[in-house]
Amino acid sequence: MNAPEVRLEVQGDPAGPVLVYLPGVHGDATLLGSFRARLGDDVRLLAVSYPAGHSWNLADHAAAIWEAVTKATPGPVWLLAESFGSQVAWAMLSAAVPRPVNGVILAGGFVRHPWLWAVTLTRRLLGGLPPAAVGPLFHVYPLWARIAYRHAPEVVAAVPDFVQRRRQPADHAALIHRLRLIELADFQATVRTLDLPVWQLTGRWDPVVPWWAVRGWLREKCPGYRGTDVRRRADHVVLATDAEGSVAAVRRWMGFSR
């Protein structure tokens, strides 16, 4: 395992509370721009990018991220886990934790995906396409993005970079691998023993993860569950489609206000 393959983009006051962003299956912070711009410099943000490979399991991700975070900053952290990033977060909490974790914020995240059949179907459909065939699928994405991210100009500006990265064969292979990791992961036993605060942030119009099913499980099974904030105008990528509301919720849960 090559720990330096995990990259961190760092911003904010070194003395501020530390928020570690764990991205979804796309694997980087290209869609985080509007959230980042609104977060404020009094929070120390560490935005993780996963390596574009298909050999690591979730424990490998967790160990490398802990190593990178430990080098970057001392003290306790918050985990902001977006979609697939929730599986990385649970893996980080399943082994020896090198520092205190103040809480976990799930942004479109889950414990065990309620619709595993949909994850499997998506993986098989995408996995059956050669990398060269994936590129044309992104021709319409910039047009759709202008509508979906109309309240997030920083995200719209980053869409060309996002599309360029997704067109790379290594990136495509990594995405398929991450979907497979979701299928294999089951952290229900881990989460049932967690007493640290767990918050759920979600968009109302989420066709990828049924947030109501996740909320029901957390309410019943997770002793650390503290509540859910459903953003009315947002979809699965809630940090991008409602950056302002997401920042307000995250800062509130972290105990900060402006």
Image (cartoon, grey):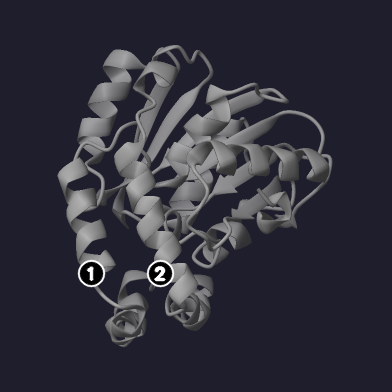
The local secondary structure at tag 1 comes to loop
Alpha-carbon span between mark 2 and mark 1: 11 Å
Q: Is residue 233 left or right of residue 246?
A: left
Residue 209 sits in quarter: top left
At label 2, the amino acid type is His
Residue 108 makes an appearance in the image: no
Within the image, what quadrant is residue 14 found in?
top right
Q: Give neighbour class at mark 1: few <14, some 14-19, many 20+ (Cα, 10 Å).
A: few
Q: Where residue 98 sits in the image (x, y, percent)?
A: 72, 25
Nearer the camera: disc 2 or disc 1: 1
Q: Quadrant of the C terminus?
A: top right
Residue at 57% from the left image edge and 44% from the top image edge: 61
- The residue at which mark 2 appears reads as 172
Residue 193 lies in what quarter of the image?
Answer: top left
| For residue 37, above or below residue 41 | below
Residue 168 appearing in the image: yes
Q: Position of residue 183 (x, y in %)?
A: 29, 42
| Amino acid type, residue under disc 1 in the picture | Gly
The residue at the point 26 percent across, 67 percent down is 126
Label pair 2/1, CB-CB below 8 angstroms:
no
Say which mark, if any, is on residue 128: 1
Secondary element under disc 2, as helix, strand or loop, is helix
Q: Which residue is more in the foreground, 144 or 194? A: 194
Which residue is at 62% across, 25% downward?
A: 102
Within 10 angstroms of label 2, few (less than 14), some, or many (20 or more) residues?
many
Q: Is residue 200 above or below residue 207?
A: above
